[in-house]
Image (tube, rainbow, N blue to C red):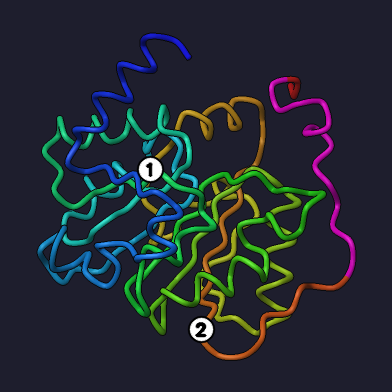
Amino acid sequence: MGKNKLDRFAEMAEFENVFQPDYDAIRENGFSLKNRWAEHYFRNQAPITLELGCGKGEYTVGLAERYPDRNFIGIDIKGARIYTGARDALQKNLKNVAFVRTKIENAELLFGPGEIAEIWLTFPDPQMKKERKRLTSSWFLERYRKFLSENAVIRLKTDSGFQYSYTRALAQQNNFRIINDCADLYATPLPDDLPAITTFYEKQWRERGMSIKYLAFSPGKEGIILEPEGEFEKDNYRSYGRKAFS
C-alpha cells in the first residue's frame, strides 16, 4: 500500500463524519448509532437517504448540498474512495452528511426499522452472472426492507441496459409502486424528482454515447419478493471492460 494511501487512511480515522465499524464487533454487540442516527449524529428528525456503493461520494455530497433539509449517508467498502467525499463534506461544512466504510451487506446492522426513507443506487455493477450480488435483487431488497420506512423509495441510475431491464421486471413482477421510469434520461427534460448531479463516471458514459436509465420505485414492506422470470439482454461492452467501449 502506497504512503499516500496510508496517510489518507490515518487522516480519515480522525474525520468526524466517517465511521469504520468492525464487522464482528457490531455483529455481536450492535452498532452504536443504530436507531439513533437522528438523535446522536444528525441531531434532527429529517429523513435519511442512503447511497449504497457511494464511491468517492460525489453524489452523496451533491445531494447534501442541494437538500439541506434532509440527511445523507454514503456507504462503500473502499476507504480510499470515501476519503474524497468525506473530506469534501468537511471542507464545505456540511452537517447533514456521513460516510460508513463497510460492505453493503452489513447495512442492516447499522440501521433500525423505518430509519431510512430513501436509497440511491448510482451506477452499480450489474453483476450479470451473479443474481444475488445485484443491489436490486430480491436478496438485497429483503434486507433493505428491514430498515426502510413504509413508503421508502429506491432510486436506480444506471448506464446498464441489463440492470435497468432486470430491475424494472422485478418491480413489475412484485407490483411495486413505480414512481418514475425512464429508459433514456437525457432524451427528455429531467424528472422533477431527479437532481441535476452528474458524476465523473456518468459523464464518461454520456461522452461515449451511452443512454442513462432511471427507475424509482417503492418496494413496500409486505409480501415475499420474487425474482423476475425470463432472460435479460446482457451489456455487450462489459465483456471487454468498460474502458474498451467507444
- Answer with the quarter of the image where residue 198 lies: top left
Question: Mark 1, residues whose alpha carbon is within 10 Å: few (<14), some, or many (≥20)?
Answer: many
Question: Mark 2, residues whose alpha carbon is within 10 Å: few (<14), some, or many (≥20)?
Answer: some
- Residue ranking furthest to the bottom: 222
Q: How far apart are marks 1 and 2 (CA)?
A: 25 Å
Total number of numbered discs in the rendering: 2
- Answer with the quarter of the image where residue 222 lies: bottom right
Q: Which amino acid does label 2 sit on?
A: Gly
Q: Which numbered dot is residue 10?
A: none
**Residue occupied by mark 1:** 59
Residue at (36% x, 17% y) in the render: 6
Instruction: Please identify the quadrant where the C terminus is shown.
Output: top right
- Residue ranking furthest to the top: 3
Report the magenta residues as a range.
Answer: 230-243
Q: Position of residue 34 (x, y in %)?
A: 30, 67
The correct choice, above or below, for 152 with respect to 15 in the image is: below
**Residue occupied by mark 2:** 220
Query: Is residue 238 within the magenta segment?
Result: yes
Of callouts 1 and 2, which one flags the residue occurring earlier in the amino acid sequence? 1
Residue at (47% x, 77% y) in the render: 146
CB atoms at circles 1 and 2 under 8 Å apart?
A: no
SS of the residue at dot 2? loop
SS of the residue at dot 1? helix
- Answer with the quarter of the image where residue 131 lies: bottom right
Residue at (37% x, 35% y) in the render: 82
Q: Position of residue 235 (x, y in %)?
A: 80, 42
Q: What residue type is labelled 1?
A: Tyr
Q: Left or right of 177: which side holds 88?
A: left
The correct choice, above or below, for 183 with respect to 37 in the image is: above
Q: Position of residue 18 (x, y in %)?
A: 27, 42
